Amino acid sequence: MSSASQEYQPYLQPGGFKNWFFSVDHKRIGLMYLYSILIFFLIAGLCAMAVRAELLFPNANHQIFDHHGYNIMFTLHGAIMVFLFIVPGIPATLGNFLLPIMIGAKDVAFPRLNILSYWIYVVGAIAVVWSLIGPLPSIENGLIKFPANWLDTGWTFYTPYSIQSSAGVIPVTLGAFILGFASILTGLNFVVTIHKFRAPGMTWHRLPLFVWALYSASLIQILATPIIGITLALLIMERVLEIGFFSAALGGDPILFENFFWFYSHPVVYIMILPAMGVVAEILPVFAKKPIFGYRAIAYSSLAIALVSFFVWGHHLFVSGMSYWSRWIFSLLTFAVAIPTAIKVFNWISTLYKGSIRMDTPMLYACGFIFLFTIAGLTGLPLATLSTDVFLHDTYFVVAHFHYTMQGGTVVALVGGLYFWWPKIYGRMYNETVGKIGFWMLFLGFNAAFMPQFILGYMGMPRRYADYLGEFAELHFASSLGAFINGLAYVVIFGNLLWAAKRGKVASKNPFNSLSLEWTVPSPPPLTNFDEVPTVTTWTYGYGEEQNA
Amino acid sequence: MSANPNWEPGTFFHLHEEDPVEEYENFKLGMWIFLATEVLLFGGIFAGLFIFKYNWPEVFRLGSQALDWKLGSVNTVILLCSSYTMAMAVDGAQRGKNKQLKLNLLLTLLFAFGFLVVKYFEWSSKFSYGYFPGSDLFFSVYFMSTGLHLLHVLIGMSFIGLVYFRARQERYHEENFGGVEVCGLYWHLVDLIWIFLFPLLYLLRH
Ligand SMILES: [Cu+2]
């Protein structure tokens, strides 16, 4: 800690609600975002547990909710996970915290817009929760019954049901609409920051790959989010004024809603996954003690994914009514996504080749990500293929594929990133043994939960059903048990992190011997990050290069 | 560092060196990006317009004939004039002519207000004939698109009002005119969207 000057004061001081909630410091905003989304991760996770508890056995001898209640549970799970947890996900938390430090800046370009983004997030979250206010769930004939105002449309709000449902569709869609603004502001802020606030010598081709990933994800946030904004606004108008845009009875088109919805919601999965890929690209070279392999290929493939992501939404409508040629083209374009994605995977693996690998907790997560994400990517191909998709559409196969990308991909990378940067964020180390236990619980529980779902889907089990035939019983049972272990893993994982933040061993400035800029400042970083703006002379990934020379 | 104003409760300054030129560049880039999101926001309604027009040509032909193209034209001219005065306001700011700036901002506000007045008469006449959002798809598109545009006019007017307020405090000069220019960018977009809406709604009537 020799560089720490006398006036060094970590950004964590002083505390107090006002000092945090009104702060424009990107590190504080990142942390506030982190704890906010984790609260919703917990809530939505509990909904998932409820869903899996209901599906432990067929309804004949076991039921917790009535079928309406089951619809509510999977809706809340999906809507909260997507809009309140995983869309802000990595960019708003680790991205906010790290982006300025990684490029040698004191803050983002528009610090006030940054805190505004967080406030908007809070307002949006309140609107979503608002829809649930009213009578509480009650128990009738041994079944938990939910009030009618609880959302039951599924997270996709498909018309016409979302127009007809008596649930509180308006507050939730309004909430998602508001959350969109938070997302746009974060993306806008990041793009301007990356363009204008790089330290001297931090050229585009020296940027950490996490920054490239954030840049690509930000472009999607900016360009896709307005579409969901107008779609949800029109859906609200549909319910208030019956404008008929999405209503076949009035001459409108429910399929139009699906097109609009997926025009946003397909690119949005890359808002979720691109930063996760960036996290992995940061962790791998540090723990393999090797320069990242194929830097430019990884950087540009992020942009390529962002670009292609806008032209594949039709694959969600293969069975909703779409012309032969559109299906053909969307199928082809969807396959195109596999190319930049595979480029990344091959480059990560090449980075590991002949490295001297340390399997610390963050590295476990990075490798876990590669394993799980590869499964996620490969199972996407039968869904992009027209003939097999007709068969697999709306089955558990899709559910499993989606969870392999979102949890196996994004959440695993988020947790890995938190373990990796926790010593920077709090200046304290997590417990390595508990960290590893947490990873293996997550890895095993997750696979046990979702691997059977691929088979279930292949056997024909439709998604979103509250009950199932006897032939699916064993696999559903296994999936539920896996899901409970998966859920328990997060108690261990976040318990370890929270414990570390308070009681963990004090960490050195750079415990993992990383070369990127954020590790050159004290842990936790001071308010302005750098005493003076650093000048960058090399790229970030020169691991072990001096020995080779 | 402990005396940094950032830590005073309730205040939120930012930490960058105060360099108006650099800041102006950042704001301009930020505004351009924001305008891109606005275009996409309207893009959803335009997409609906084209699709419904294709599916229901007769509804759209009759709907368009029910609109008053003269009032629409008046509003188009009004907005074009307002864009001109806005540009003159930016010019005034860039050359440090505060009087020109203030006068043109006021004129822009006046034109914008005129637009609102015409819109008021237009909408109320539609209501009196029994045309509402949801009457048919044409009027849904009409009210949604012009309504969203109207909202943007109002936001733009508040923005111009804020700039005028600051201009009265002599905040803008040759080295600091970014706020005016960014406001101008926004206003031109509001104008531009109308330029697309007008022919699509009012003029394609045969
Ligand atoms: Cu998709």
Image: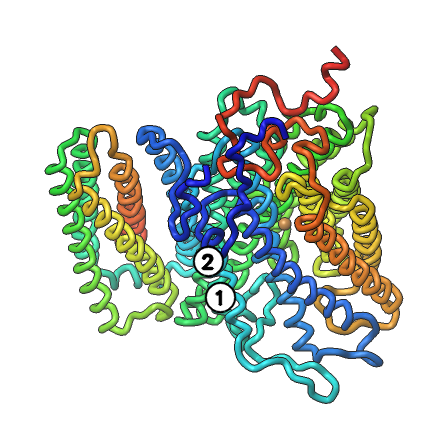
Residue A221's place in the image compared with A39, above or below, is: above
Name the residue that disc number 1 marks: A127
Q: Position of residue A289 (x, y in %)?
A: 76, 26
As drawn, the residue found furthest toward the top would be A549
Q: Residue at x 57, y 80 (%)?
A: A148
Chain to which the residue tagged by mark 2 belongs: A
Q: Residue at x 84, y 80 (%)?
A: A61
Instruction: Please report contact status of discs 2 and 1: CB closer than 8 Å, yes or no.
Output: yes
Horizontal side of A6 relative to B180 (left or right) equals right
Q: Residue at x 41, y 45 (%)?
A: A112
Name the residue that disc number 2 marks: A178
Q: Residue at x 52, y 52 (%)?
A: A15
Q: Is residue A389 visible?
A: no
- A192 or A458: nearer the viewer: A192
Q: Position of residue B44 (x, y in %)?
A: 44, 53
The Cα–Cα distance between marks 2 and 1, rounded to whole angstroms, is: 9 Å
